[in-house]
Image (tube, rainbow, N blue to C red):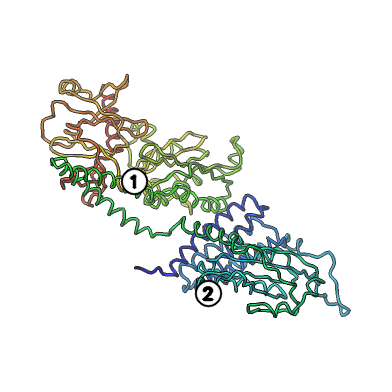
Amino acid sequence: MSTLDPVAVFRTEAAECLEAIEAGLLDLTHQLDNRDLVDAVFRGLHTLKGSGAMFGFEALAAFTHHCETAFDRVRKGEVAATSELVAAVLAAQDHMRALVDQPDADHGDTGHKLLAQLQAAVGGKQAAAVAAPAAVPTTAAGREAPAKKKKNSWRIRFSLPANSMANGTNPLGLLDELRDLGECSVRANTSAIPPLDELAPTELHISWDVTLTSEQDRSAIDDVFIFVLDDMELSVEEISGTAAATADPVEEKAAPAPVVATSAAAVPEFRPVEAVPAKREAPAAVSQAKAAENVRVPAERLDELMDRVGELVIAQSRLSQLASASTDIALRSVSEEIERLSGELRDTMMVLRMVPVATLFSRFRRLVHDLARETGKVIELVTEGESTEVDKTVIERLADPLVHLVRNSIDHGLETPADRLASGKTEAGTVTLSARQAGGEVIISIKDDGRGINRERVRAKAESSGLIQPGQPLSDSELLQLIFAPGFSTAAAITNLSGRGVGMDVVKKTVEALRGAIDIVSVPGQGSEVSLRIPLTLAIIDGLLVRVGSGRYVIPLSAVEECLELSLEEDLRSRGRSFISLRDSLVPFLRLRDLFRTGTKPDVHQKVVVISTGTERVGLVVDQIIGDHQTVIKSMSKLHNNVATFSGATILGDGSVALILDVGHLVAAGQQQEAQLRVAG
């Protein structure tokens, strides 16, 4: 049984905490007066500081303390939340990540510079205006007299869930924080402790009655319990100074449990909170239920489990083949049961690997925020379809390509505010990230409302680079696809954002490696849209097993529209044009027997499998359709990287190998063949 590394667990939780802080800061940029967002960021910084100190990340805790203090001043109304403060804490957050990942590294004077920026953000004129008193009292010697604050007395009663200590909550820490606020006396109520033979050492059955005299207000008390407030019982009542002073101190000494008192103020008569145990059970149950909702599992274990499921599917396919050739009814029954169970296990495993694209889209809020400050453009980021789910591996591999596309939309697409106003547009440019599911694919689009792609500049750059011949006829789609050529860039100068021509070709290679395709549409003066068509999963797919000559191939079932019969006579008649008529429309088709050079004669009754990617369709002529097949995708070797017709391979039930057809490549080849025939005709 493996033991989790506490430091590794902290780093994972710290990363999640930093993401939550970043999201709160980016939301706060648009709602600077939102108190809930200020509180959320403060709680995140407070959690990060406390956890860092607990796990020995002292530099992180010390640095985060300054950011927490800045937001504490905002919460108390001493300073106003400004865009400069948000920008300063966002920059500081990057330093926090470095302190989490490399706590012992030399980070130079980065921290000091960031703290100076933070101090400037909270020490401006607004802060001075808020903090300046109406009149400053002075002593007889002319010195400023210390301000006297009114002391308030509070009666605080609280009880924690029974499983609090097991979950890491230390009630003594809460009491220490209360003592830090002022004069404090504490009484423990032990009336709910069960008999010794029923007592569980890890359970908490004590509640506390505290009398606090402090210059702090009610919010300071709430801050003490801010992280346990949801699962506890808390009562805070303000009492008069007289009542606090006249309370009988003897009661405290007569308490049945040890009492910790740090104040001369006596405690009023203690009355146990009624039905504490009964009320405590429900929050404890809720807390346990919440803890059971999510389990943190390393991604590597999911990958290993996915591999085992894939091997199980292959073994099940072999068993089904043996059972179909056998007359043993019991064997067939077991085979069918295992087929059902392996199918359910496969579907469950696929769901486990699926994550919403919101986890991907959320990364771009910070990117757009920083690019807006860097370029001086006003940018609004709109996200749609964030609940669409994609395989986690796809999400990981799409992050960098989407960064390139978003940066290009902002740099090349969106105009400056002055240019937008001059062209009749709004000052703010919009970049829209959207995702939707279409069959077995997910379409992720990056759209902007900028100037669009300059076709003349693209053609001129392509001709000067030797990508096309001068005057070579190209369709609009072919011309726009040239921007994905290696080294291609229409930028007039190299900047921090673009100009080196090393981004878009990487996007295309990554998408093609995912068995996806890229579509691009651009309207001059209105903007551009780049759509990535990505398969839902990279591990197991439903396929249509076909035979061409003596070889067997798999066509992804999600791309199959329908199957038709092509007789030998029709095949001979269509030799010159390679088109079939399908409901009053002509669909080009490819003879896989000729494409793969099988050297075999066609079957008498050939079949046409019509496949599509979006609006483009093409037919594939095969000799036989064998049937559905659960396809475990195996990557091709490096020797076959240049074979674009196939996207992978799979192992069949009899141990032989079947190649998986690359639908996007075949559709493109069919459409190209159609264009050539139309030109020739």
Kindly identify the amino acid type of the residue bearing the numbered disc 1: Asp
Work out whether 509 lies above or below 39: above
Residue 598 shows which numbered tag? none
Marks 2/1 in contact by CB < 8 Å: the verdict is no
Work out whether 479 lies above or below 3: above
Residue 395 percent across, percent down from the top left = 40, 50
Circle 1: element type:
helix
Residue at the limit of the structure toward the right, as seen here: 140
Residue 415 percent across, percent down from the top left = 55, 42
Which residue in the protein does label 2 denote? Answer: 196
Work out whether 515 lies above or below 21: above
Instruction: Determine whether, in the image, residue 164 is placed left or right of residue 588.
Output: right
Residue at the limit of the structure toward the left, as seen here: 600
> Image quadrant of residue 575?
top left
Visible residue check, residue 501 = no
Residue 140 percent across, percent down from the top left = 89, 79
Q: How many marks?
A: 2
Quarter of the image where the C terminus is located: top left
Frontmost residue, 477 versus 2: 2
Frontmost residue, 116 versus 92: 92
Circle 2: element type:
helix
User: From mark 2 to mark 1, how far is it between C-alphas?
Assistant: 50 Å
Kindly identify the amino acid type of the residue bearing the numbered disc 2: Leu
> Image quadrant of residue 182?
bottom right
Q: Residue at x 24, y 52 (%)?
A: 311
Visible residue check, residue 354 = yes
Residue 347 shows which numbered tag? 1
Q: Residue at x 25, y 45 (%)?
A: 337
